[in-house]
Image (cartoon, coloured by chain):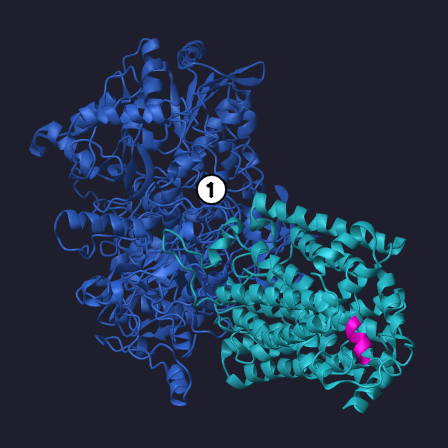
Chain colours: A cyan, B blue
Amino acid sequence: MATATTERGALTHPDVERLSDVNTDILKILSRPGKGWWALFLLAAAGVGVFFTSWVIQLVRGIGVSGLNDPVGWGVYITCFVFWVGIAHSGTLISAILFLFRAPWRQAVYRTAEAMTVFAVMTAGLFPLIHLGRMWHGYWLFPYPNSRFLWPNFKSPLIWDVFAVTTYFTVSATFFFLGTIPDIAAARDGATGLRKRFYQVISLGWRGTDRQWHHFGKAYIFLAALATPLVLSVHSVVSWDFAMAIVPGWHATIFAPYFVAGAIYSGVAMVITLIVPMRKVWGLEKYVTTKHIDALAKLCLLTSLIVLYSYLCEFFLAWYSGGVIERASFWNRLFGPYWWATWTMLTCNGLVPIMLWFKRVRHSIPALWVISIFVNIGMWFERYVIIVTSLHHEYEPFAWGMYRPSHVEVGILVGSFAWFGFWFLLFTRILPPVAIAELKEVLPPPLRKIRKPAEEAHA
Amino acid sequence: MTDGIKRRDFLKVLGVTGAGATLAGCSTKPAERLLPYLTMPEDITPGVATWYTTVCEGCQAQCGMWVRTREGRAVKVEGNPNHPVSGGALCSKGHATLQQLYNPDRYAGPMVRENGALRPATWEEAETLLSQRIQSAAGNALFVSGHMGPTMTRLVDQFVGAVGGRRVQYDALSEAPLREAMRIAFGVDALPKYDIAGARLLLSFGNDFIGSGASPVEYGRDFSRMSAVDEHGSKGRFVFLGPRLSVTGLNADQWVPIKPGGEASVALAMANIIAGDSGAAGPYDAVLRAFDPRTTAQAAGVSEDDIRDLADRFKNEGPSLALGPGMGAHHRNATAANLAVLILNAVAGNVGRTISLDGGPTQAARPYADVEGAIGAMAGGQVGVVMVHGANPAFTLPSGSGFNDAFGSVGFKVSFAQAPDETSAMADLILPDNHFLESWGDSEPRPGLMTLRQPVMLPVPHFQSKHTGDVLLSVGKRLGHDLGGATFYEYLRAAHEDLHTPAMGEFETAWQDALKKGLVQHDVAPMHADAQLRAPDAALTFDAPALDGDGDLTLLVYPSPRFGAGEFANSPWMLELPDPVSKITWHSWLEINPETADARGLENGAFVTVTSPYGSLTVPVWRYPGIREDAVALAMGAGHTDYGRYANGNGVNAMELLPAVSEQPSGALVTIATKVTIVPTGGGRRLATVEGSNGSQEGRPIAPAVALASLTPGAGHEPADEKGLKELQGVGGFVPVDAQGGTPEAFPLQGSRHAPYDKPEETARWAMAIDLDKCTGCSACVTACQSENNVPFVGEDQVLMGREMHWMRIERYYEKVDATAASDLDVRFLPMLCQQCGNAPCEPVCPVFATYSTPEGVNAQIYNRCVGTRYCANNCPYKVRVFNWYRFTDAIPEPLNWQFNPDCTVRDNGVMEKCSFCMQRVREAENRVALEDRGSIPGDGEVLMACQQSCPAEAIVWGNIRDPNSRVARVSANQRTYRVLNEEINTQPAVNYLKKVTFHEVEAEG
């Protein structure tokens, strides 16, 4: 085991010379930000302004400021909700599942992925509120004791959503925070002034004692085990928002695995999208090597195949079912008025990732980055296609309609990326964006000659 | 609600006067006595409605009305079941008269023009001014009236007689050609009475009697009785001959798309075939001979065989009836066309059988020629004072008539308009009349049938209006003429006292009885029972009429089923009511055949400039398969410039394309007068249609039909085989609710019978049955529902976004429409409303239980609980749930919002709403039944849904389907019964539809 680990470590980060380099390289990211960061941050802050302005406009005037209408009751908002929940999935997958499976390449990227998860859930969680006609009554979806003895309807997938998303947020945020404690302590040790105070508080008195490491390890593996089923369950529940309805194009048993695969797919793509520039700007090439990126790309490729298979399955089954309405729905998806959205989805999610079969592509960072953007776009459109094309041509032909997103919806869509970026940019300056302690564990000798069995569990 | 104090005063007054409701006229006047129809309580109980009987003045049909008032405000109008014209039903426009009552644009009071601008005045000042001007006009007064009741007409005639002048009646929509044809053919100066219900073969030569005829409600009901299949499996056949399918035409079993103006020749050719050498056509025998079927057919654009076939049927499938072109089809030979159709009826022996020369409608038959003369007099300076009442000639006449200039040249112009219109915009003095719901009056829709109009509420206090009768009496007095009565109420009463015969008992009792019932029937002896065809006394040509211009398309201008000639164009209900044919709301459109449109590359909504020799206008096109390829059609009534906030600038006024020509010899205004050219402008606009699929069912069994031949008379309902669902069960598929035996009475479903749901046999299961063979698509139910349930209107921009809020919609699907040859026509209408599913897809998805099934099986919507996820609407396969995207009801201005039904919640922003079977009516009846100790379920027929109540076609039945003797249970026990999509998705709806019956074979699905 020890040999294997060492070898893997050696392969993983061949350019890291000394353990102390890790601390220096990572913690220097937390120093005073440059102009580029400030520019991005101000842009994000402005976007957050757009986000909340749009939302306030909608609250004051009514949800009529969106482009939604009577056949198409859900549109950009629910598309964004599913998209951001999907993005949230790869973080936990990388940090929890790959942790349990001992994947050798996760250490370099998991902190970023986890942060992304937390912020993505924070973004996603807003959309169910945004899309409500009466947001001020949104708390009625929670089962709180009240004098009227009114409970939410536990049959409704929307209630399951409430539980799924809040649980997921709680667990992923806790998991993220817990994993960061040793690194916060590392940052604390080098910090001064107010920043030091802050780290002192949030590092919860971490001193790196054996006892602390022992508890830390236990807690971490426990939370990883707790988070693992959530990766599968949360997006399954989200898929049931659709699959439990009788809308043609939604009502399909394949939805849960299809959505989970799609979520991981989009999440991994988003990790690539985020980590490539970070790696470049902060010179993290020796920590996040081509091999790491290659592993992410392979995961992307695998999930893209599952997603493509699901698409084909849906189309095949619509044809094979013989149902006039089901067939019409899928025909309309391909050749109806929203053909452009469907073909964007098929191209970005099914065709473009075929290039990932080639090692040269996987090892070309710019190519990979571009592909990851395509996947992000494709996965957003996947949800748009599922929601809008299914609703706009449903059972009653007379009641068919068209949906066009309004300015407010576009404002909220763009604003949601800004909201996510706002938190993520703050994160890169406050918390170590690469896991220092875990990286060190996989670094090769001579820094550490023998791995003790007791430490195995901490790794 | 600024009116709290006045309303209270009103209640006190009502309270102390005991049995009769007392209405204090204008506060200083003596009280006039009103009687509600229903047994009155000691005094008005807040929360309990009071009903009054009156007569609708929405169009010339004069339907009897019941008006529901709550705490002194009219909130709903319904048809008076005792009334022979309306028979209890009412059309959309009838409902919209409420919006005219509360029209926020009504004149606030009398207005006087001073230095070119109108300023408010007092009634004293206004009446003094009018008397002075009449005096100085020295006998040159002109009174232009619309249609009025007999007593009002008498008063006006008396008034103009006393002050010196004359009265001219102007009917914007007129049956003058038919009346003239009756005079020529039979020497009868009246409209005929059609027994449509008694016919087995009905021919309409372009007559839109359901949408805009002389009596749409009555004829619609009669038509449905004629054409719907009866329990013996017999069904009347309806053939429509004309260039364009109106809503009436869409109900036809066969469409013979004859050329515009071809009616006379086709009718005469048919008469020729039927009469043969029998001489049945009397003085017209020679005329008939000239119409050889072969050449005639060619000229009219149909095949000879079709004419022969039709003639055979007309003779043998009797009783038959043919209707000549009605109000919507006046071309230059309209009288001849009507005469030809009368001859056809005569040779087929229909006169005295399905056509009676006595007892026909009395209204709406004055020709344009009368007004033409008045215009000449005005232009010639022979008129000192002109008064306009109940008409808007500045809008409804073509500009070529010269009305505007002539009217403008008169020294003093008076308008009695309630609300601004194009004519009153030019007036020097405006004396706003009361709305008819605030007025006394009468009408005589049929000879001898006197119907009484009584005020149902105090005049809306926002407007200081005054009954024109009162004004005339008062002005007469100032001029020293006693016209007989201090108020119009006295005058009216005196007039009816004169009509009263001792045989009818004491007058006071008879009067009160008449007020309750709404009518008095005086005996009128039939005068023309044995009239024979007479030789024509006027020169007539039966050839195709001349059309002006050298365009390639004939322009058909037809009265709008929603606006009439424009009177309802400021009613948001009417604007937002989807046109029964095109399903377009708000804006105007030009109907064009898709072939013609393709040849010119025109898509729906493309702007074209339509040019006739008389004018041109730009309008978007709408591709309509129900119009000939050589014609285009445009509705009247839109394009107002001075008619109020909703009407102005909306659509185009078709009259701008027409010449001011009167047809000879009737003198009617010609509306099919010109050829036009259309030139695409390159631009376009989206049409605010509510239709999603261009008239196709897309192969789905939404509105299936069944051929008459495949019906078994007397067969009961066989449950659908639910093949798909059973197959699913057979292969172990998961069907959570048993698909078998899922009839409406099977609610609650197995597995959900607990708590209040555990004794289904003790509760009702409210259900509905809609007979699609009866439904004519007239859309009266849509407005009735809107009125009853406070359904907001949303405006064109919102309809364009797909946000119309109607709880009920009439879906229109084309199955067979061929504009090139005589052929079977198959167009389906389907009233779609919440299906009240027993296994409702909307219910489990709501996260907060805002929607659920009541123990009576109604799918209730709890507005206060709704948070607005819209998941229920997404999951509703029928798409009958509508969402409040904005605070639509807050945007409804005072006093238009006075119409709101206080028994029905006004919904807030962000909540879902939908039909819940007029829950407020059911609850009211349940309370009444409980108070009267009659159990807990109201009796059959004790509650009527608003849509059902209004339906002229009697297509909707509602009740407790668990009671096997209820009407809904009996109607549903029919082999035509089906439930929309139930076989596919097992929703177990409570709304049963009865398939439309066709004469031709139909495919099994769809």
Name the image quarter holding the C terminus of chain A: bottom right
Locate residue B533, reporting x and y percent. Answer: 28, 51
Q: Is residue A367 left or right of residue B358?
A: right
Q: Is residue A441 magenta?
A: yes
Instruction: Indicate whether B231 appears above or below B909.
Output: below
Q: Secondary structure at mark 1?
A: helix
Q: Amino acid at mark 1?
A: Thr
Q: Position of residue B726 (x, y in %)?
A: 37, 84
Residue B714 image-quadrant placement: bottom left
Res B150 → quadrant:
top left
* Quarter location, residue A123: bottom right
Quarter of the N terminus of chain A within the rendering = bottom right
Return the residue nearer the eye: B283 or B217: B217
Helix, strand or loop: magenta stretch: helix
Residue A391 in percent (x, y) is at 55, 66
Q: Is residue A379 magenta?
A: no
Q: Please name whichever residue, B587 or B966, is drawn nearer the observer in this view of the structure.
A: B966
* B576 relative position to B486: left or right: right
Q: What residue is drawn where x is 90% and y is 71%?
A: A21
Residue matched to label 1: B889
Answer with left or right where residue A81 lies relative to residue B417.
right
Disc 1 chain ID: B
What segment is highlighted magenta in the picture? A437-442
Q: Residues within 10 Å of mark 1 (few under 14, many from 20)?
A: some
Query: Is A48 placed above or below B470 here?
Result: below
* Residue B662 seen in this snapshot: no
B874 to the left or right of B993: right
Where's residue B215, x and y in %? 33, 47
Say if residue B507 shows up in the picture.
Answer: yes
Count of marks overlaid on the render: 1
| Along the viewing direction, whichever of B44 and A148 lies nearer the viewer | A148
